[in-house]
Image: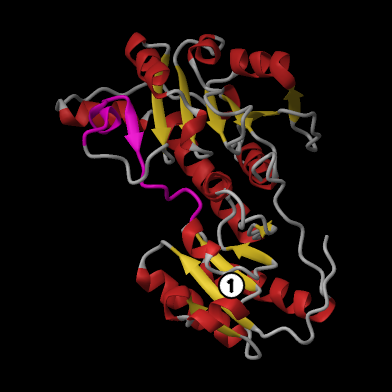
Amino acid sequence: MNITKVESEPKLIAFVSRVPAAEVEQWILILNKLLPDSDVCLFDSLTPLQKQQCTLAVVANPDPEELRQLPNLKWVHSTWAGVERMVAELMVAGSGVSFPIVRLVDPALAQTMAEAVLAWTLYLHREMPTYRMQQANTQWVQLPYIGASDRTVAILGLGKLGAHAAKRLQVNGFRVLGWSRHKKTLESIQTFAAEDGLETVLSQSDIVINLLPLTNETRGLLNAKVFGQCKWGVSIINFGRGATVNEGDLIASLDAGLISHAVLDVFEEEPLPANHLYWAHEKITVLPHISAPTNISSASKIVANNIREYYKSGLIPEAVDRALGY
């Protein structure tokens, strides 16, 4: 953490974003109510002098060129939990954008993600993709019921989101295995780590859920080699990052029957292009990045509290490790 005197600093805060205008307006309205001693302003409304005065920015998928126009930033607070894209874009932008980045850590987000993980695990567990296809073909076929205790679900990524999701699945009767790059311990859940651990988890799991952040180590991790280590007929859920999955290898594995179905909520390019092969693939369910949206009501309170504490103490909250990307 960095310690800086802030008593004499102007409390003008820039809001830098490339999200829809209605969402931006909501953020600015709520933050100004929560921070009555500050003035949270949309970047486009700032004068050149005000841009010089800003030492703090709240950001949601910001344009790095706009951040470059705020030369005196001491740190920025992201309204998103994931900041990999932002870090990558800032690295490309080069010098002048080396300030600490604080990402959103919202307990409500873990609850939302756990809810999505359970919902789409149940979607696969109760054979909804098959019944959807049967409806399209006017087929009336009742599949044998399999109990949750007879399904093994793997969670890849055991951070706050993964740990919460794993426990939610376990409470609902599934056998849950957890994997992370480095060994972690979860109460009453068997966990594994490193390359050997990943192969062990994949070989046992009926449903594999990716919640890993995007790093140099996880980019393209879910590829032909990894899919080949899975049980035949495994289902895949990707709620982590799109670039973790090798798209060509996924489609080939689906076409070969190795993977029975994939639920995809995150993609390398978003929105997903209209001509992408995923849209028409009968074994893929496409979601528009909705597994764990930020709750502005709860998130704004966390952002505002972090800013208030900074102005009181001069302590910048724990920042992102740029080398790791999170």
x and y percentages locating residue 88 in the rendered image: 55, 44
Residue at 26 percent of width and 32 percent of height: 276
In the picture of the structure, the residue carrying the numbered disc 1 is 300
Residue at 26 percent of width and 26 percent of height: 281
Please tell me whether the stretch drawn in magenta is mainly helix, strand or loop. Answer: loop
Given residues 311 and 143, the one toward you in this image is 311
Magenta extent: 275-293
Q: In this view, does 43 lie to the left or right of 81?
A: left
Whether residue 23 is visible here, answered yes or no, is: yes
Label 1 neighbour load within 10 Å: few <14, some 14-19, many 20+: many
Is 233 within the magenta?
Answer: no
Q: In which quarter of the image is the N terminus?
A: bottom right
Q: In this view, does 282 lie to the left or right of 244?
A: left
x and y percentages locating residue 153 in the rendered image: 58, 27
Does 136 sit above or below residue 43? Answer: above
Q: Residue furthest bottom?
A: 36
Given residues 202 and 308, the one toward you in this image is 308
The quarter of the picture where residue 157 lies is top right
At numbered mark 1, what does the secondary structure look like: helix, strand or loop?
helix
The quarter of the picture where residue 139 lies is top left
x and y percentages locating residue 241 in the rendered image: 51, 38
Residue at 40 percent of width and 28 percent of height: 262
Does 231 sit above or below residue 20? Answer: above
Whether residue 61 is visible here, answered yes or no, is: no
Residue at 77 percent of width and 58 percent of height: 318
